[in-house]
Image (cartoon, grey):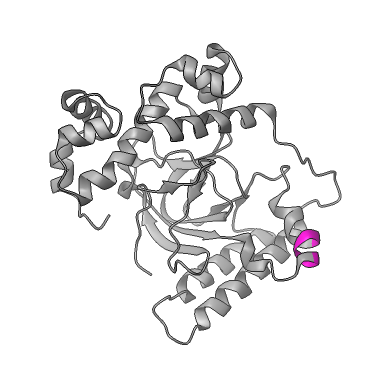
Amino acid sequence: MNSNVRYCATFNVDASETVAYNNPLFPAYVAYSVLSSYPDYSSISHWHRELEFIVIKKGMMTYNVNGTLIELTEGNGIFVNSRQLHYGFSVNHHECEFICILLSPELLQGNEWFYQNYIEPITDNLTYPYLYLNRYGWNQSILEALEYLYHSFDTTSRNGLSYFILIEQFIGIMKVLYENLDMESPIPKIESQELSSLRNMITYIEEHFMQHLTLADIALSGACCKSRCSLLFKKYLRDTPITYTTKLRLRKSLLVLLASDKTITDIAYEYGFGGASYYCETFKKYYGTSPLLYKKTHHTTE
């Protein structure tokens, strides 16, 4: 399995990430990645319907899930449940090698009764936004299944066996989760008001990032005041609303920068920076180099 880079992701109308599956017709993403492949050693906060599994192979990184910081170390990993805000990063720009696996629940949706009674109690369970995976007890069986899935998945094979193995390992992982998570306690069905408001503001930024955005505009989209807006972004994303918007604009501009012949001026205006000089100044602030030098040192295949 080749290493893949996902920082130039696209998004749905609700600002959830559109996952670039290995096979566009099969809703699964399996890859070996390095944190340095992401600008500033950090992905941007996002969510998606797919369940996310990370296994750290070398080094370490911090994972932010709904504002909670989890330190992931070599040999361990994390399960991020469906539609949870999350991203991985390294403040000190330390390298981290990891397996990243995203699996859509629809792979297990063949029987509606089974899906509603045994899969949704896990994917819709807001009691478990994430689960830290270590090498002890039943956690280890999940990590072993993820390793086996990663080494077995091969979309270039014509016999299709790897697809059977992926689904087999996926259902095995869900079985382990169902057996060991507390399914007896009441499952909260309503997301917290804070996260709901934050999602609305992120969605608004995603839809209007090319325009001039003020703190008041962003706060209004989340039905809150400016101070509350800033508090929510700081609490859950460790950024201000304006800084988050700037980082989003930069990340969106990367794909065009790397894979097209557009001028810096054109890119700057297209992605809401108002001019080439401001774009270059901001780009260097976050990535430590100019857009042109960045383009020269990165392959357009990224």
Write the start and end of the magenta stretch as one range.
113-117
> Left of 94 or right of it: where is 160?
right
Determine the residue located farthest toward the bottom in the rendered image.
159
Would residue 257 be counted in the magenta stretch? Answer: no
**Residue 211 sits above or below residue 203 on the image:** above
> Left of 175 or right of it: where is 26?
left
Q: Which of 272 and 248 is in front in this view?
A: 272
Would residue 247 be visible to someone looking at this image?
A: yes
Would residue 93 be visible to someone looking at this image?
A: no
**Residue 123 sits above or below residue 114 on the image:** above
Rendered residue at 36%/47% (across/down) = 7
Q: Nearer the viewer, residue 132 or 208?
A: 208
Q: Position of residue 159 (x, y in %)?
A: 47, 87
Q: Position of residue 77 (x, y in %)?
A: 54, 53
Rendered residue at 48%/27% (across/down) = 238
> Left of 165 or right of it: where is 127?
right
Place residue 128 in its image quadrant: top right
Rendered residue at 21%/23% (across/down) = 278
Q: Position of residue 184 (x, y in %)?
A: 86, 50
Q: Quadrant of the N terminus?
A: bottom left
Rendered residue at 35%/47% (across/down) = 8
Q: In which quarter of the image is the C terminus?
A: bottom left
> Left of 119 or right of it: where is 248?
left
